[in-house]
Image (spheres, rainbow, N blue to C red):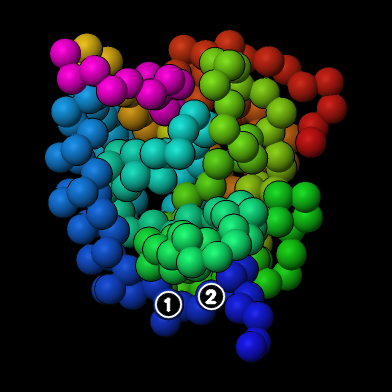
Amino acid sequence: MEKINHARKYAKDFNILTRLYQYYALYILYIPIFSLFYKFKCIRNKNLENKPYIFAANHISYCDPFLMNMVTVRPLAYMAKKELYEVKGNFGKWVATNISRLGGFSVNREKLEVSTIKTCVDVFKANFNLCIFPQGGIRKNKKIEEVNKGFVVIAKMVKADIVPVGLSGLETYNWNIFKRPVVNLKMGTPISYELPHDEIIKQWKQQVAQLTDYELVEDTEQQ
């Protein structure tokens, strides 16, 4: 059996069915269920232009892709770590299939591959927006640090501005319907892809730290 390249998707793969599946997952499944346990507060940037962006957020939970759909209200394509596609058995196939249906494609967090870059180009050809979590993995320590500069490389290659998004309040999971902590989803100001690499990373970290009220940690060396 031919091995599927989950990193390579084409413009035709990001279509109306992808959008419908995202809306179904968000409004029929996710929001009704999780609204029993959380209150969601969205602060959007209403001045965004009518063009695709890269929405780059800090990463605090496995629910973050759905949170990004909620705050952006735009069709999204997601960069998902390749390990999610490597789970064995029928459950692994189910996970890979549904991530793909939601607009996801795999990325090697250790090395930005050509197939991933080509997919990013096709995302914008399809007039979808790209969702990226620059910290790489889930961070629950309420610190903005250790940012991978791969998202800046992609922004410059596809010529798309970056919109910082701050997610907070879901660092721990709540299953008490009487508690319902507030989950904050806040959108920042677009950062031009034409700025120098280090300046883009600096502005992203500063904005996300302000949006989340997390501690801003200056890296001694950019990742």
Residue 2, labelled with which disc?
none
> What residue occupies the far front of the structure in this picture?
89
Quarter of the image that includes the C terminus: top right
Q: Is there CB contact under 8 Å for labels 2 and 1?
A: yes
For label 2, the SS is loop
Position of 221 with respect to 204 (left or right) is right
**Magenta region: which residues?**
166-178
Viewer-nearest residue: 193 or 83: 83
Amino acid found under the numbered disc labelled 2: Lys
Residue 176: say if magenta: yes
Left or right, residue 114 beside residue 6: right
The image quadrant of residue 218 is top right
Which residue in the rendered view is the most extreme toward the right? Answer: 221
Residue 130 within the magenta-colored segment of the rendering: no
Relative height, residue 82 to residue 215 (above, below): below
Task: Give the main secondary structure, helix, strand or loop, of the magenta stretch.
Answer: loop
The residue beneath circle 1 is 13
Q: Quadrant of residue 75?
A: bottom left
| Residue in the picture at 77% in, 22% down | 219
| 184 vs 176, nearest the viewer | 176
Q: What's the amino acid at mark 1?
A: Asp
Label 2 sits on residue: 9
Which residue sits at x=57%, y=33%? 138
